[in-house]
Image: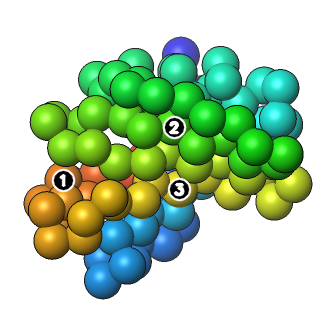
Amino acid sequence: MDEHQTEFGLMEFLPTEGRIVIRAPHFDFDTFPELGERLLQILSASVIEKQCDADIHSWLIDFEDCQLFLKAEHYSECVWFEALGVQNSEEELAYLASLFERGF
């Protein structure tokens, strides 16, 4: 599956804001759940809660005992991770940013 090796990548890491914006394959509102589940499976993360609004998916996830939001905005095709508490998530965000920087 070589085409999946660089399916996800880092676009921007904003450590002071507790946010990682990632590059992801094209999606729309209806296809994001499958893409999001695939991404979380790759990261060995799990969903705690899912919420959908008019054009955004907002999932509360657990990544290595750290709770983060995985958000996806349909119109801009923007996907990002957001910390609930920046100070409590610095290590995990830096680690995730390094993974996405390498791409997979």
Q: Earlier in the sequence, mark 3 or mark 2?
A: 2
Residue closer to the observer: 99 or 74? 74
Q: Type of residue at label 1? A: Glu
Residue 52 location (% of width, % of height)? 70, 36
Hey, what amino acid is under mark 2? Trp
Name the one closer to the observer, 20 or 100.
Answer: 20
Left or right of 52? Residue 84 is: left
Q: Earlier in the sequence, mark 1 or mark 2?
A: 2
Q: Which residue is mark 1?
A: 92
Look at 28% across and 33% down and name the residue there. Answer: 62
Residue 23 x, y percent position in the rendering:
59, 53
Q: Which residue is mark 3?
A: 80
Across and down, in percent, residue 10 comes to: 47, 60
Distance from disc 1 to disc 2, alpha carbons, whole Å, reads: 17 Å
Tag 1: Cα neighbours inside 10 Å, few (<14), some, or many (≥20)? some
Q: Is residue 78 left or right of residue 4?
A: right
Determine the CA span between mark 3 and mark 2.
Answer: 11 Å
Mark 1 lies on a secondary structure that is: helix
Q: Secondary structure at mark 2?
A: strand
Kindly identify the residue that appears in the image at 82 percent across and 47 percent down: 55
Query: In the image, what residue type sits under mark 3?
Result: Trp
Q: Earlier in the sequence, mark 1 or mark 3?
A: 3
Circle 3 packing at 10 Å, graded few (<14), some (14-19), many (20+), is many
Front-most of 18 and 53? 53
Quarter-of-image position of residue 75: bottom right
> Mark 1 to mark 3: distance in Å?
14 Å
Q: Which residue is mark 2?
A: 59
Figure check: 72 above or below 38: below
For the C terminus, the quadrant is: top left
Q: Kindly state the secondary structure of the residue where label 3 is placed.
A: strand
